[in-house]
Amino acid sequence: MNNEKLLEVNNLKMYHVIRKGLFGGKFYVKAVDNIDLTLDKGEALAIIGESGSGKTTLGKTILRLYEPLDGKIIFEGWDVTHIKGKELKKYRRWTGFVQQDPYGALPPFMSIKQILEEPLKIHKIGNKEERIERIHRVLEEVRLTPVEDFINKYPHMLSGGQQQRVVIARSIITDPKLIIADEPVSMLDASVRIEVLRLLRDIQKKHNIGIIYISHDLSTTKYFSNRIHIMYAGKIVEGGPSKEVIHNPQHPYTKYLINALPDPDPNNRFVKRNVPPGEPPSLVNPPSGCRFNPRCPLSIKGLCDVKEPGYTYISERHFVKCWYYEKGG
Ligand SMILES: Nc1ncnc2c1ncn2[C@@H]1O[C@H](COP(=O)(O)OP(=O)(O)O)[C@@H](O)[C@H]1O
Ligand SMILES: [Mg+2]
């Protein structure tokens, strides 16, 4: 890895708008709220958070499948935050998306060959021969071999794991520099999950692709990441090198995820749990201050429920956003 910066996200915001009833008001789901992150060329960053914390919204906003409300997305020094038309098309070429549901991501009436050829046509890559060559090459890379057995099949003829391999093949066929893999194995049979994760990791390393790996499952990051960010209710609450975050978690929420925090309920003291008490907040009306404060055993009244914490650095690259540390622990 050469520490050249691939992606820089500053203060990114994306709110979903929902309308209630015919004459009802407009509500905002504050799914991505002031998020900062960076990714080096060829680096793997994992974003971990429970369901509904805004991970997919973040991924899709970075890929410009959603329009950001505020903030900046800089890709190789190029401001892509509000690009449109031809510019956006160019950005699509350099980015790839692997979604949770492979079957939903593949057009059912196209053969594997047509599916893989489409992005090459859209981006005018190669002539007919070169395209076929590329299709063969990516199918070999995702180990759908012998290629002849797969190339003329349709998505429904493949297993979930094979379908996800096609999605991965499609995501790399334009030689992207950034891939966002959003829960890429959570809908696959448990028996093939690790294999598909390893495959994605191998391909990413071989081609020096920067990847953002999104998951609700912290345990799968060991196959993946150089760094981890922990997401809670539309915010990143902690981030750093994977080993540091896993072995020395700081934020109370991360500690729950890693099973390192005792339960505040005395009846549960000896029962280790990896979910904090209570429910995740509504993102329409999130708690003021730190969004974790209503569930946090360390919450300081009059501070955590009032003002949002800033960054506290535990080591050079390991940060936490928590008043407990900002106040000196
Ligand atoms: N298209 C949408 N319209 C309205 N609300 C949405 C939409 N997509 C997601 N949300 C809401 O935004 C929040 C974050 O969702 P999402 O980004 O899918 O989180 P995650 O991927 O972490 O499960 C949730 O409250 C979800 O209900
Ligand atoms: Mg999601």
Image (tube, rainbow, N blue to C red):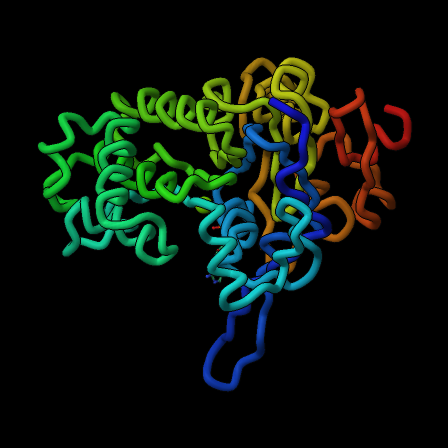
The mark tally for this picture is 0
Q: Quadrant of residue 230?
A: top right
In-image side of 34 versus 214 (left or right): right
Q: Nearer the viewer, residue 292 or 1?
A: 1
> Residue placed at 10% from the left, 33% from the top?
148
Give the quarter of the figure containing the C terminus. Answer: top right
Q: Is residue 117 above or below residue 203?
A: below
> Residue placed at 53% from the left, 44% from the top?
55
Q: Is residue 287 above or below residue 274?
A: below
Q: Where does residue 161 sit, x and y in percent of width and height?
A: 24, 32
Q: Where does residue 316 sit, x and y in percent of width and height?
A: 80, 22
> Residue placed at 81% from the left, 41% from the top?
309
Q: Nearer the viewer, residue 131 or 312?
A: 131
Q: Is residue 50 above or below residue 281?
A: above
Q: Nearer the viewer, residue 252 or 67?
A: 67
Q: Where does residue 275 sit, x and y in percent of width and height?
A: 54, 30
Q: Is residue 270 above or below residue 21?
A: above
> Image quadrant of ligand 2?
top left
Residue reaching furthest to the bottom: 23
> Residue placed at 55% from the left, 29% from the top?
42
Q: Nearer the viewer, residue 121 or 255?
A: 121
In-image side of 15 versus 166 (left or right): right
Give the quarter of the figure containing the N terminus. Answer: top right
